[in-house]
Image (cartoon, rainbow, N blue to C red):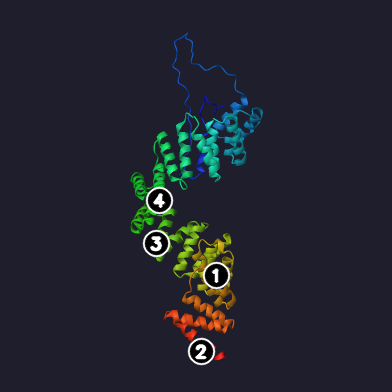
């Protein structure tokens, strides 16, 4: 079979498919080429002592399967290899061919099982360890993938490019949790095969993850110098510059890149986000709108545009965007809060209150306590406007566990108690509000003074 030790040729089509579905910046196509021994021609009559021992003729079905695999005719190969594997259940190379074929046909569960059978038949066989590791990584099972890839790096193979792929895959898996180990793995890969642009990008990301921003910037700029159209490194360098509070340099980098590729979605999104951070909402909206038009199902872009419309007080345009997002993510508390905020500005207080009650029902789902307090504040306001004083007080109680009282919260609490005819509580809270308001809220201060007179006359 063509995966036997004497022939190191793999199926390029499947190997390419196997790794191209894992993130593109992690792996390129894995191609193995035949590298059989070169035997010098001997004089006539000489005995060729280097000739391999004669073996039994290969099963015709295996020959046909080999031909089908070479043509990437995987359905035919599967029909031929399945009965062959049943007849030879411990043939590691045959099992690997079958697993490879199943993998190519997206029969992931079967392929995983067959790769494992090949490994069990010959634990020292490199190829199934690597292929299984890639399969597991594509499925997000990174711990299991790491174990297989690490094992592959300890095994013997005469194709160093494949072993380098295993090291690069390990580096990507270890990148976030263990950048120091990932750097060692990347170095091991570069010792086996020449450094690639992806290697330079990864080295910069690893330096950044380790806190060495100077080394990271040098790596990114080194790659940009030789590949100025590399949008991945442009995005990475932009991220670094923004992290270092260098927005002007980030903006210059992005605008220069977009001048050459004006429709690049990643760069446009970064520039829109940069403008948003700088308060340049009017400049950010056209970029975000263009991105949303091109990618209407991208939730991140939709949310960015909705947020920008809201900040620009274009609430009628933000509202349908938030509604579409909530159709797909019904319980996201911050999304519910953002949508409710828009409804409050549109004076749809009942709808806002309903959204915020859903959000507050799961306080543990908020990213942090400040976000919870903000949603509670919005609920208190919406409920007050909706003449629901009980809910107003419940919301203010949640807010009060996280943040100190503010003039607004005191006034909302006072009016809620007032509506519930809690005269003493309302009077005390109106007085507290007037003490801290200091002319900042003239309308509310006038109302508080008026209500204090009225409440005093009801005693």
Instruction: Sort mark 4 into few (<14), some (14-19) or many (20+) by Cα contacts within 10 Å.
Output: some
Foreground disc of the pair 2, 4: 2
Between marks 1 and 4, how big is the CA–CA gap?
40 Å
Foreground disc of the pair 2, 3: 2
Q: Is there CB contact under 8 Å for labels 2 and 3? A: no
In the rendered structure, the answer to whether residue 199 lies left or right of residue 139 reads left
- Please provide percent x and percent y for residue 217: 35, 49
Which residue is labeled 4 in the image? 236
Foreground disc of the pair 1, 3: 1
| Residue at image coords 52%, 70% | 399
The residue closer to the viewer here, 13 or 204, is: 204
Q: Is there CB contact under 8 Å for labels 4 and 3? A: no
Which residue is labeled 3 in the image? 275
Q: Is residue 86 visible?
A: yes
User: Which mark sits nearer the N-terminus, 2 or 3?
Assistant: 3
In the rendered structure, the answer to whether residue 278 lies left or right of residue 444 reads left
User: Which mark sits nearer the N-terminus, 4 or 3?
Assistant: 4
User: Which mark sits nearer the N-terminus, 2 or 4?
Assistant: 4
User: Which mark sits nearer the N-terminus, 1 or 3?
Assistant: 3
Between marks 2 and 4, how big is the CA–CA gap?
62 Å
User: Which mark sits nearer the N-terminus, 1 or 4?
Assistant: 4
Q: Is there CB contact under 8 Å for labels 2 and 1? A: no
Q: Is residue 319 visible?
A: no
Q: Is there CB contact under 8 Å for labels 2 and 4? A: no
Which residue is labeled 2 in the image? 453
Between marks 2 and 1, how big is the CA–CA gap?
30 Å
Which residue is labeled 1 in the image? 398
| Residue at image coords 54%, 80% | 415
- Please provide percent x and percent y for residue 420: 59, 81
Q: Secondary structure at mark 2?
A: helix
């Amino acid at each position: 079979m063509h995966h036997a030790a004497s022939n190191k040729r793999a199926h390029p089509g499947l190997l390419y498919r196997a790794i191209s579905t894992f993130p593109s910046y992690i792996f390129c196509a894995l191609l193995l080429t035949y590298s059989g021994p070169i035997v010098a021609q001997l004089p006539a009559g000489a005995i060729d002592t280097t000739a391999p021992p004669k073996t039994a003729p290969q099963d015709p079905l295996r020959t046909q399967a080999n031909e089908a695999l070479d043509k990437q005719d995987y359905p035919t190969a599967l029909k031929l290899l399945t009965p062959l594997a049943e007849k030879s259940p411990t043939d590691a190379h045959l099992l690997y061919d079958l697993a490879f074929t199943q993998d190519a046909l997206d029969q992931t569960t079967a392929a995983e099982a067959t790769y494992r059978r090949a490994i069990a038949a010959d634990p020292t066989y490199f190829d199934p360890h690597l292929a299984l590791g890639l399969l597991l990584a594509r499925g997000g099972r990174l711990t299991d993938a790491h174990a297989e890839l690490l094992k592959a790096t300890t095994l013997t193979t005469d194709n160093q490019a494949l072993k380098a792929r295993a090291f690069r895959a390990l580096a990507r898996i270890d990148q976030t949790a263990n950048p120091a180990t990932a750097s060692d793995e990347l170095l091991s890969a570069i010792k086996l095969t020449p450094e690639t642009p992806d290697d330079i990008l990864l080295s910069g990301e690893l330096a950044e993850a380790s806190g060495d921003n100077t080394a990271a910037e040098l790596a990114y700029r080194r790659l940009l110098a030789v590949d100025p159209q590399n949008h991945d490194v442009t995005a990475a360098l932009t991220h670094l510059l923004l992290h270092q509070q260098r927005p002007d340099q980030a903006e210059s980098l992005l605008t220069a890149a977009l001048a050459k590729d004006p429709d690049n979605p990643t760069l446009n999104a970064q520039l829109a986000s940069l403008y948003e951070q700088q308060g340049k909402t009017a400049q950010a909206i056209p970029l975000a709108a263009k991105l949303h038009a091109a990618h209407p199902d991208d939730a991140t872009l939709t949310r960015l545009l909705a947020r920008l419309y809201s900040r620009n007080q274009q609430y009628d345009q933000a509202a349908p965007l938030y509604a579409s997002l909530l159709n797909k993510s019904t319980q996201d508390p911050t999304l519910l809060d953002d949508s409710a905020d828009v409804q409050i500005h549109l004076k749809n207080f009942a709808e806002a209150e309903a959204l915020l009650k859903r959000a507050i029902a799961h306080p543990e789902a908020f990213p942090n306590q400040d976000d919870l307090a903000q949603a509670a504040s919005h609920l208190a306001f919406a409920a007050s406007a909706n003449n629901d004083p009980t809910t107003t007080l419940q919301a203010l109680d949640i807010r009060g566990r996280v943040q100190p009282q503010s003039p607004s919260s005191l006034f909302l609490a006072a009016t809620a108690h007032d509506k519930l005819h809690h005269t003493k509580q309302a009077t005390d809270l109106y007085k507290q509000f007037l003490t801290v308001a200091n002319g900042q809220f003239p309308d509310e201060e006038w109302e508080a003074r008026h209500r204090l007179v009225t409440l005093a006359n009801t005693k």
